[in-house]
Amino acid sequence: MPSTAKPKYRTFCNVNERTLTREELSLCLSRGFVAIDPGADTGLAAFGPCAELLQLTSLPHAQALAYVRNYPGLLVCEVPKVYPVQQNKVNPNDLITLALKVGGLVAVAPAYLIVEPANWKGGLAKDVTARRSLAALRDSEKPIVRALLDSASESKVHNALDALAIGFWASARIRFGPIGPLD
C-alpha cells in the first residue's frame, strides 16, 4: 500500500507530470541547473556541471520567466509558505503573488524542484545564508558575485544571494536546513 505521508517538497517532470526519482534528480543537478528566489525582483543563479556558478543576477519576473522558458535544464525554486502568525513577518497576500510567480516559472520549466524555505534553510536568517554562501565561493565564482554586488542595489541583491544559497543547497555544497535535496 502506498505511503500517505506528504513529501517535504515535490519534484515533477513537466513532460509527463511524474515525480523524478532520486537518480533522475541527481543527474539533472549534475548537468547544471538554475536556482531562483522569487520576489519583487527575482534572484537567479545559473550553475553548470559540478555546480559551478555561471551567472548571478536579479531581474524582473518577466525576464526570469523568459530565461527559464529558454533554459533546457532543471529549475530549483523556492515556493512561499504561510507560517503561523507569530512567525510570519510577511503579508500573506504578498505570498499569493509570489506563489503565482512560482507557478508561472514551473509551468515553463522542463523539470523542476520546488522547496519551502524551512526545508532548505531551516530557520536561518537571510544574512546568515548569504554570509555562508559568500564564504563557500570558489575563486572562479568570486568575480561573478562581485559584479552583482558592485552594480545592483541592496534591494535587488538579497534575492540574488538567496538564489545563490538555494543553488548551493541543491548541489549539496552547503547544508543550511534540516534536509538536503536528495533526502
Image: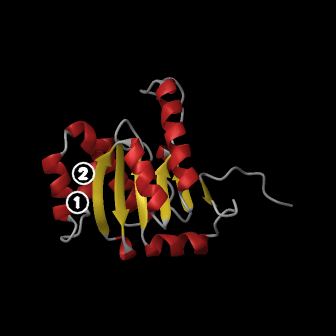
Q: To which residue does mark 1 refer?
A: 135
Crowd around label 2: few <14 · some 14–19 · many ≥20 (10 Å): few
Residue 80 seen in this snapshot: no
Characterize the local packing of mark 1: few (<14), some (14-19) or many (20 or more) Cα atoms within 10 angstroms: few
Q: Position of residue 153 (x, y in %)?
A: 19, 39
Q: Which amino acid lies under the numbered mark 2 shown in the image of this protein?
A: Arg
Q: Which residue corresponds to the image point at 59% horizontal and 73% vertical from the top-left? A: 24
Which residue is painted at 35% across and 53% down in the image? 44
What is the distance, in whole Å, between disc 1 and disc 2 at their CAs?
6 Å
Camera-nearest residue between 172 and 159? 159
The reply to whether callout 1 and callout 2 are in contact (CB within 8 Å) is yes
Q: What residue type is labelled 1?
A: Ala
For mark 1, give the secondary structure.
Answer: helix
13 relative to 96, above or below: below
Q: In this view, does 175 lie to the left or right of 18?
A: left
The residue drawn where x is 78% and y is 52% is 4
122 and 167: which one is in front?
167
Task: Please report the residue visible at 49 percent of the width from the left and 41 percent of the height from the top.
Answer: 101
The image shows residue 157 at horizontal and vertical percentages of 25, 44
List x then y, in percent, for residue 166.
Answer: 40, 55
- Percent coordinates x, y for residue 60 in the rendering: 35, 42
- The C terminus, quarter of image: bottom right
Indicate whether 23 appears above or below 18. below
Quarter of the rendering occupied by the N terminus: bottom right
Q: Quadrant of residue 52?
A: bottom left
Of the numbered discs in the image, which one, if any, rests on residue 131?
A: 2
